[in-house]
Amino acid sequence: NAGVTQTPKFRVLKTGQSMTLLCAQDMNHEYMYWYRQDPGMGLRLIHYSVGEGTTAKGEVPDGYNVSRLKKQNFLLGLESAAPSQTSVYFCASGTSVYEQYFGPGTRLTVT
Amino acid sequence: GESVGLHLPTLSVQEGDNSIINCAYSNSASDYFIWYKQESGKGPQFIIDIRSNMDKRQGQRVTVLLNKTVKHLSLQIAATQPGDSAVYFCAENLFGGTSYGKLTFGQGTILTVHP
């Protein structure tokens, strides 16, 4: 099993550009999450999904959209990137809240 | 909203010593807590968890203690090894309601183990 994978690993965007981050898991997990991690801070939840076709807002959802069209994939979109969205983004999945398996992260820089 | 925080941002220990990492939480209704380890350039990795109906839980070389009276959580690592060097996060969850499945993370403690 590959576990949780994230694409891409690194990306540099100009202000106003858009992009989509892909998270894929092969563990048949119902729950999937997107977090961002900024220097000196813990992870903050952006959006999450409790099953295929469902999504919900987390702690810091503004400026992001998500979709869960397939159970194994969870996409995070930035419609108009801003420098404040420079961060490391982590995806996680799990069968419940008991354990969340994290991907390796995507380092995004917005100039 | 309420949040989870850490007393010490950094901790340096000698190889073989025991390490104790502390965490304070403010939401007295939280009923589930997790410790994660994050190595440089990687995602967080689950270490151990504890429910609010427990005071102590042990794993392999790790012990988590929960003191609900003072809303304090600690992670003890026995015989710390250089491979334990990482950032350690505590996280809390409140079951039920609209917050189900959502973890609130502390800011993290950097553990450095010297050979």
Image: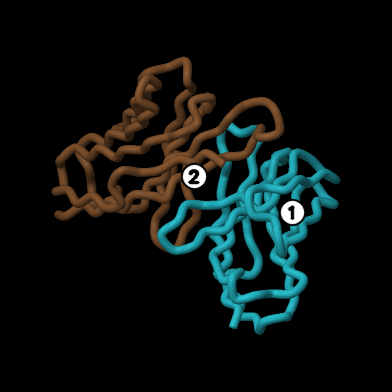
Taking B84 as reference, is B75 above or below it?
above
- Between the residue at mark 2 and the residue at mark 1, the CA separation in whole angstroms equals 21 Å
Can you tell which quarter of the image residue A75 is in?
bottom right
Asked which secondary structure carries label 2, the reply is strand
Taking B90 as reference, is A92 above or below it?
below
Residue A32 pos. (x, y %): 69, 45
Q: Which label number is shown at residue A12?
A: none
Q: Which quadrant is home to the C terminus of chain A?
A: bottom right
**Residue B83 seen in render:** no
Q: Residue furthest front?
A: B1
Taking A105 as reference, is B89 above or below it?
above
Residue density around tag 2, few if under 14, some if 14–19, many if 20 or more, within 10 Å:
many
Residue type beneath disc 2: Phe
> Residue at left 61%, top 50%?
A45
Taking B47 as reference, is A69 above or below it?
below
Specify whether B10 is left or right of B40. left
Residue density around tag 1, few if under 14, some if 14–19, many if 20 or more, within 10 Å:
many
Marks 2, 1 in one chain: no
Question: In the rendered image of this protein, which colour is used for chain B?
Answer: brown
Specify whether B25 is left or right of B82. right
Q: Which residue is mark 1?
A: A74
Residue type beneath disc 1: Phe
Residue B58 pos. (x, y %): 35, 24
Residue B48 pos. (x, y %): 43, 33
Q: Which residue is mark 2?
A: B105
> Residue at left 28%, top 47%?
B8
Question: In the rendered image of this protein, which colour is used for chain A?
Answer: cyan
- Closer-to-camera residue (B49/A16): A16
Determine the chain carrying the residue at label 2: B
- Closer-to-camera residue (A39/A52): A39
- Closer-to-camera residue (B103/B63): B103
Determine the chain carrying the residue at label 1: A
